[in-house]
Each structure stands twice: as C-alpha cells, then as structure tokens.
Image (cartoon, rainbow, N blue to C red):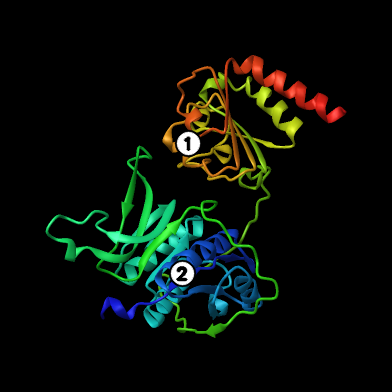
Amino acid sequence: MGLEEYKGVYIYAQQVDNEISSIAFELLGKGKELAAALGTDVTAVLLGSNVKGLCDKLAEYGADKVILVDDPALETYRTEPYAHALASVINEYKPEIMLVGATAIGRDLGPTVSARVATGLTADCTVLEIGDFPLVATPGKEDEQKHNQLLMTRPAFGGNTIATIACPDNRPQMATVRPGVMQKIDPIAGAKANIIEYNPGFTENNRYVEIMEVVKAVGQVQNIMDAKILVSGGRGVGSEENFKLLDDLAAALGGMVSCSRAVVENGWKAQDYQVGQTGKTVRPNVYFAIGISGAIQHVAGMEESDLIIAINKDADAPIFDVADYGIVGDLNKIVPALTEAIKAQAEK
C-alpha cells in the first residue's frame, strides 16, 4: 500500500451518553487548518448507538463529511468494539491524518488503534502543523527531505523540553491532542452533514468486557477550563491558608482560583485546579499569575489567555516575559489592595 493512497484529515468525534464532547469540536477546528494546508477535506468519525442525530452538529463545527458507525455494541465505551470500529474505518477509507482527543477515552482508544493499523502515534500534542521533515534538510541531501508532513509537538522528559515528532514512513499519521489547546470554529448555522454510514460488523470475542453497572458520580469541582477569569497561585503564595487572598480576589471578579504544579505537590490544592503541561490548558479572558515564576511547563498551559497579569516579588521572574501587565512587589499587600479596589468600583 503506497502512502499516496492515504488522503484526508480525520478526527475521532467522541460522544458520551449521546452528547458530543467539546474536544471533538476543537479537533475539527484544527483539522480544518491542516486540511486547508494539504488541499483536502476534514472528516469526523462518529461511533455510538442511535447517534445519527448528532451528525449535523459536527457539520456545524466544520466536518465536510461524517463517517457514522452506529451499532448497539457501541452504546457504552468499551475498548474492543470501539477499537475495532475505528481501525476498520481507517483500513477502509485510508486517512492521511487521524486525530483523537487526549481524554480518558482517547488515551485508551488512540494507542490501541494505532497498533492495529501498524502506524505510530504521538501522544498529548499541544501543537500540530504541516511542514517539512527533517525540519532542516541535511546539506547535500535536500532531495531526501519530505514535504507536507504532520509535525506533532508535545512536552517531553517530564515537561522539561518540547519535542517535534513526525511519522514520515507510515500512514495514517496519528496524534492524541490535549483538550483546551485547539480552537473550535464559530458554528455554521444550519449546516447539514454529508453522512457516510459504515458498519464493519461486531463479533464478540474474549476481549469484550461486560459492563455490570455504570455509576455516575456528581463532582463538586468546578472546571477551570470553563472560567472567563482565573486567579492562579504558585509556590510564592506561601501556604494553603494564604490562598484565601486569591479566593477573595476571584470572588470579587466573578472568577475561579487555579494553581501551578508546585501548589498541588505541596498539597494546597487538588490537581483538578492545576494549570500547565501536567495539568489543564486554559484560555480565559483574564489570567492572574500570582506568585508563579513562569516555568515553561506552566506557561504552556496558559499562554493563550487573552490578558495575562503577573504579580511577583522577583522582577526577573520569567512570567513577566509572557505577561501583558506585571506588578513587582509583595502579593500579601498587592492582592488585598486590588480586591478592595475592585469591590469599591463594583459598588459605585
């Protein structure tokens, strides 16, 4: 099978309980960019049971086509039937690129499928683009450089460096993508899906698991990825008790509190509130970085915020390199004063 037979950008449109996950729309947004660079189209692969009604929603967010595999075996996510379905779609339609969200489901499904279709997979990507590989041609071997490759960038070595990876000799080029990193497009009102119905057939084997019970726990943790304003604290806040200053500021602004990895490691906040490469990627309208030094691992999770305001006593802290506004000084004095000023303004 020649690599030239593989065409198109495909994304796995994750749905849970017949509701499309936000990551599917984010992947479609990035898929449109990649497809435009390659002169091709973007296809969403929707797997589930009685989910045909979701196809138009995928069209609204940029899917040129939707490949639908609808079967009772796919009612609830299980590795074997879902992997069989997605691998079958890949073998049948031969996409050049296959993107999967790096969710709990995607991190299970993506590697399983890549092994079955005998290709590589780059996990937890934060940047995807079309370019040349190697990035810089070896002198005298310029004709060996391959063009129009998917360049997949992800954190490596515990987040201490950034690696750009390509898969030049196998297809499809597969990646899982961190939620919150890519931008969804503005929905196209009234878009109708071009649906291709495909079913490879399902025969139970010893890799099928039987779901005895589904227990849905209602979490009390707010999702910082949904916040418009984030007040984020780092090691420089000093203590768990001192986070009360950030809680007060967030309350005055109508925002939420988040934190850096050091705060989680110290046990001051739960990991649900962590921003960064090993936490969540956020894009709020306003991001306060308070007592945060600005290590690359943290910046990677918040640098796309619309407005970044840093407060740190160290004038040379790297966070000031990415901040739109910076205040050098003692957060214990600055944060309460800022909170009171915001409250006073709100009362006018």
Amino acid identity at mark 1: His
Question: Residue at label 1?
Answer: 298
Q: Nearer the viewer, residue 78 or 243?
A: 243
Q: Which x, y percent locates residue 221?
A: 65, 42
Question: Residue at label 2?
Answer: 36
Mark 1, other Cα within 10 Å: few <14 / some 14–19 / many ≥20: many
Q: Which x, y percent locates residue 110?
A: 41, 63
Q: Which x, y percent locates residue 178?
A: 48, 52
Q: Is residue 65 above or below residue 23?
A: below
Q: Secondary structure at mark 1?
A: helix
Amino acid identity at mark 2: Ala
Q: Residue furthest left?
A: 140
In this picture, residue 17 sits left or right of residue 207 = right
Q: Is residue 155 above or below residue 317?
A: below
Q: Residue furthest right?
A: 348
Q: Secondary structure at mark 2?
A: helix
Which mark, by number, is residue 201? none
In this picture, residue 219 sits left or right of residue 134 = right
